[in-house]
Image (tube, rainbow, N blue to C red):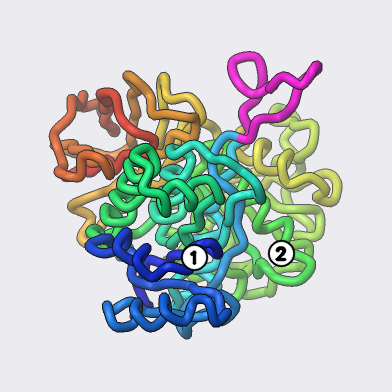
Amino acid sequence: MTVDWTPFRWPATWTDPSALSLLRGTAIDYLLVDKGPEFESVRSLARQQGFQVADPAALPAGVSLVKGEWAGVLMSRGAGGGASAGPTGVPWVNSNGWAVRLAGALHPSTAVWVQTPPAENARIAPDSYLITMSDSASHGGRWVIALDAPFAAGLAAQRPESIAAWKKLCDVAAFFAGHKEWAGYQPQAVVGVVSDYTGDHEFFGGELLNLLSRAGQHYRILLRDKVSEASLQGLRAVIYADTAPASPALRSRILTFVQAGGMLIAGPKWGGVSTPPLPAEDHPRFALHAVGKGRIALAKEEQADPYVWANDSVVLVSHRHDLVRFWNGGATGSFYTVSPDRKRAVVHLLFYSNRGPDAASVRVVGRYRSARISTADLPAARSVEMVSQQDAVEVHLPQVSQYVALELEV
């Protein structure tokens, strides 16, 4: 069983132990406090009050650390210093969800903490904290809460606007701490990504997961030495991301999947294919071959750009198989999970802009009879309008915050 703490990086300017009053009654229960003697009274009182206290440089046993990025829309700079993201530019979304999932797959017996402190001298909008925390927590991790200097100073001075922002942040921590059962739900996927995710394959495999998420593709992480027939069930395609050849056993297992109707997307080192390319399905970067009931898409050149591979993969598989689609959502992300008995689902909806949408809609593949939503500011689940389709449901959201838990029942 993994540890399940909510960690907080104690600000370097908080030497007065009275600041612990801000944490009482919250979900925060693990404090990372500097070793200096000026914090001895803080450490002592924190332990008396039941907090776990540790040196920031020493991770507790049972925790894997991910060095992440501040979640949200990354604003690129345009001509004259203007921002190019938005309706006339492509918003680049930073998310740590893929890294949380990968760390969990590589180290399944540990909890995953995401370390993403604010940039030095930064002043960050309160809602930016909410999306950074929700982005990690919705994928099963815990962000190590870290405050920018103005926020920490405002809390120490008990400024009303800082206290209000702190309450919102604590509400998000409490929301996820109150839904620990979601950690046992299984991710739904269209494609499986096979790699050992280490050494020469670490960057390409990880970045492929990151970019598939940005493209709205739902994936399953398949460790190369642990691929089984069961792990391929329900997938439309498999991406073999490594340049090292597959073992004979793995190759046979994937080819069986393809012959039954699946698709394999692989590089040239996958090896020869007995059937000729299909001229009618020519692609500028992949040669498609019919194998049994399925297809093999072999890259014409060695992989170079994971961005191109991710987007080509989505097109090769086809958007008609998308599990989640948004309308009027802006910069969005989703993580679709189902309970072990398959009677309930939670689709974590993330809106990475500065605020949540006014009237977004979302389509989710699956047959469900009811839909409810909950958010950190309104944690009690409430029913929402749902329209049933042949093999999916469409849910119309009211005005919501940047994170929504969409709960569905069969």
Report the quarter where the C terminus lies.
top left
232 is higher (above) or lower (below) than 373: below
Residue range corresponding to the magenta coloring:
74-92
248 is higher (above) or lower (below) than 171: below
Say the numbered circle drawn on residue 9: 1
At a point 71% along the width and 41% down the height, the residue shown is 307
Mark 2 or 1, nearer chain start:
1
Using the numbered discs, state the Cα–Cα distance from disc 2 to disc 1 in whole angstroms.
Answer: 29 Å
Report the quarter where the N terminus lies.
bottom left
Q: Label 2: how many residues lie within 10 Å, few (<14), some (14-19) or many (20+)?
A: some
At a point 68% along the width and 74% down the height, the residue shown is 248
Residue most extreme to the right: 301
Observer-nearest residue: 207 or 261? Answer: 207
Q: Secondary structure at mark 1?
A: strand
Q: Amino acid at mark 1?
A: Arg
Q: Where is residue 289 drawn, in percent x and y?
A: 69, 43
Q: Amino acid at mark 2?
A: Glu
Say which of marks 2 and 1 sits in front. Answer: 1
- Residue 327 shown left or right of residue 255 in the figure: left
Q: Is residue 190 visible in the rendered structure shown here?
A: no
Q: Secondary structure at mark 2?
A: helix
Q: Where is residue 137 drawn, in percent x and y?
A: 40, 55
* Tag 2 residue: 202
Q: Where is residue 106 drawn, in percent x and y?
A: 55, 72
Observer-nearest residue: 120 or 218? Answer: 120
288 is higher (above) or lower (below) than 106: above
